[in-house]
Image: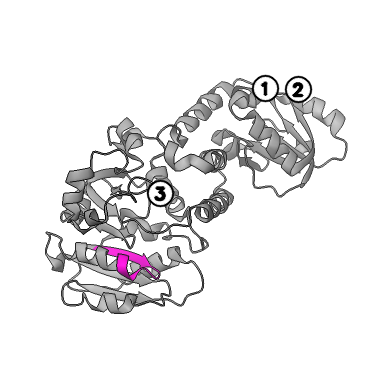
Amino acid sequence: MSPQREDRPRIAVVIPTYNRSALLRSTLTALARQRIPVSEFEVVVSDDGSSDDTAAVVAGFADTLRLTYHFQEDLGFRAAAARNAGARRTSAPILLFLDAGEVPGPDFLSAHLAAQLSGSAVVGYIFGYQHQPDGPVAALDDTAWTLPPEQLVRQYGDSPEFRDVRHLAFERFAFDLGRCIVPWQWFWSGNCSVRAADFWAVGGFDDDFRSWGGEDTELAYRLFRHGARFVVSRAAWAIEMPHPRTTVANLDSGGVNLLRFLHKHPDTVVELWWAWFAREQPTHFRIRHEWNVEDEYLLVLDAVAAARSIDVSGELAKLRQVAGNARIAVLGCGDDVPDWLAGAALFDFDREVVENAEHKVSHAIGVRTALPDNSVDLVFVTSRLRTLWDRWGSEIRAEAHRIGRDFLSAAT
């Protein structure tokens, strides 16, 4: 997928950008201060159609950095496509994705290279990442941002308002994502690296994501399913410089993209990821450490184990007596689906049931399915979902009313 060069760099930094020339200049300046030799890394700026002086800013670093500049026409937000295009223009075995406006410390690249010895998908630490435009990071004295990044970290790095918003989640696992069963939820494209072979093996970023949010965790999900080992590196840090944000619009876009993510990968853990965002959207960046998919997925796995001893064949037999010719969706169908339900929309949260079913069964709890609105007449929830009802019953009921006219439950 990438050109071959005899002087291949060890690592390539791919920076997507759009009309952020001042922020980009800060990022390139910090990369020019790296302690590893400039011959060992390459910087690829992938411009998503900027109309400002981005090209001139990049040209200004031609003598200090090993640079490639790629420009794509402005056809709307295409950060995923820009990252892929940038990645295609390097032969480096490790791809590091960094946003314009992220200012790394002088040992940033060496830290990513060191972390790559332990894993193939590295989550870099991001200081100053805040989604509150009037928050404490944005309120730092303007003179603070003229300091070298390492001095900023020494001065503010222990402040809860300045450290990575994922810090408490990382701390919970002692900064060892090997202890986490859903490590991909923390892989953000602002500062991350991945082996090029793994990146291309899963197809890179999905170009279908054409607005803010979700494309990085969707890539991480595919990398995880591919077998990538996730590690977090505090040493591979960068500081996100303050800049204007369209927070409400970004959150709305993130919700749409997570639903796209779920439709592409109908899986209970992705369903929970979408459900958490939908439930906590107004404040989710502030409470990320208190609630994450890890906890919810563990509860679902416990429920899967409990449901394996539940036989719902009797419930399905009674359903036939009232169903008539109705279009039916069954949540928690189990592994003994009668032939008369072969044409129904069947769902179960046990992956073994889904993989071994004689009829088509989708992997879902029922919090959010891939069915369109009003697509069935009757939604039936079996008793297999009883252990999840207290936690997710209201959402399952709401989903049933979205997709169907009538609702019956043996789980309450």
Residue 7 vs residue 292, the one in the foreground: 292
| Residue placed under numbered mark 2 in the picture | 314
Assess whether mark 2 and mark 1 are in contact (beta carbons under 8 angstroms). yes
Alpha-carbon distance for marks 1 and 2?
Answer: 7 Å
**Residue at (58%, 50%) from the top-left corner?**
259
- Quadrant in which residue 79 is drawn: bottom left
| Residue placed under numbered mark 3 in the picture | 134
Q: Position of residue 236 (x, y in %)?
A: 23, 50
Q: Position of residue 298 (x, y in %)?
A: 47, 29
Mark earlier in primary sequence (3, 1): 3
- Neighbours of disc 1 within 10 Å: few (<14), some (14-19), many (20+): some
| Residue placed under numbered mark 1 in the picture | 311
Alpha-carbon distance for marks 3 and 1?
Answer: 54 Å
Disc 3 marks a residue whose amino acid type is: Asp
Residue 310 vs residue 109, the one in the foreground: 109
Is 58 on the left-hand or right-hand side of 283?
A: left
- Quadrant in which residue 288 is drawn: top left
**Residue at (41%, 60%) from the top-left corner?**
204
Q: Is residue 62 magenta?
A: no
